[in-house]
Amino acid sequence: MNKMGKINFKFLINNTEWQAPHLQRMEYERNLHVLHNLRQHGIEVKDGIKTLDDDDIDYLTAKDAWRVSVDTRAGLNSETVEQHYRQSFQRSNAFWKDHPFSQDLPMRKSTCQMLVEGISLQKYMQTVAEMTHDARLLLHGHPEHMNAIETPEKIIGIEPFGTYGTPTLCIVKHTEVAEMGPQIQNDADPLFPIKTAGKAYLLDGTTEINSPFHQYRPTENGLEAKLAVYWPATVPDEIVTGHSLHLAMEFYESLVYAETQLK
């Protein structure tokens, strides 16, 4: 178990443990990537009053890269992102239309197992809910998260799935497990009583592209989670393996925030 303070945790991807230093290094690399990518798309990256060029970005420390990354993304509204990323969104739209997804078609799956001690499942889920309704916390959840809008029914968000390709502008609709396809329903573990599921679509609302499905159960000293996202069977390995790591980074940051709420 990794020790964070009151919280201890372990992330397993295909039976390989990713420890905190590994995840932190990956976050650093992705923050630098995002900042370069924003500049590539014509968006100004600033550290305070100083405009950064690509060399400046590469001289940011991990702590500063997080700060500049969150500040820059927080300063973008949806209209600005859509304007500067129009061609990238067109390319990601075309990609998903070339890789059909349906609840009744064969699927591939990104998975990550999370084991946590030192916080109850109820308290943890409360902190996750807080993160989804705080713009800066949401942006700090993963370097590649852009501003998102969440309602009780859906999430409108932007991210490059699996750290692959260009960002996708999509809608994720909260869904009951009974409405998911047979593969996902077969993966439902009765020992994990709390389940969250969704169906992700392009903005047309009809082109389905993936399905997140996370399962949680309380343990004696904390909680265990089975985290998964289901993809079209034809997507490249890089999306499947990359999004498993995306899940580990994202949920690691949820624990970082949860730790602050226990002090």
Image: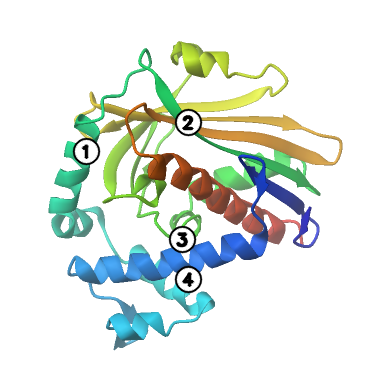
Q: Residue furthest front?
A: 237
Q: Residues within 10 Å of mark 2 (few under 14, many from 20)?
A: some
Image: 256 above or below 11: below
Image quadrant in which the C terminus is located: bottom right
Image: 237 above or below 103: below
Image: 68 above or below 98: below
Query: Does the residue at mark 1 contact the one at mark 4 (Cβ under 8 Å)?
Result: no
Number of numbered markers: 4
The residue mark sitting in front, 3 or 1, is 1
Which kind of residue does numbered mark 3 sit on? Arg
Earlier in the chain: of badge 1 and badge 2, it is 1
| Colouring of the image | rainbow
Query: Does the residue at mark 3 contact the one at mark 1 (Cβ under 8 Å)?
Result: no
Badge 4 is on which residue? 66
Query: Which residue does the image show at 43% across and 14% down from the upper left?
Result: 181
Which kind of residue does numbered mark 4 sit on? Trp
Spatial separation of the CA atoms under disc 1 and disc 4: 29 Å
Which kind of residue does numbered mark 2 sit on? Lys
Left or right, 226 with reference to 229: right
Percent x, y of residue 190: 69, 16
Percent x, y of residue 174: 43, 27
The residue mark sitting in front, 4 or 2, is 2
Earlier in the chain: of badge 1 and badge 4, it is 4
Q: Which element is circle 2 on?
A: strand
Q: Please tell me the numbered disc located at residue 109.
A: 2
Badge 1 is on which residue? 95
Q: Please tell me the numbered disc located at residue 136.
A: 3
Q: How crowded is mark 4: few (under 14 residues within 10 Å), some or many (20 or more)?
A: many
Q: Nearer the viewer, residue 134 or 170?
A: 170
Spatial separation of the CA atoms under disc 1 and disc 2: 18 Å
Query: Which residue does the image show at 69% across and 61% down from the upper left?
Result: 260
Earlier in the chain: of badge 4 and badge 3, it is 4
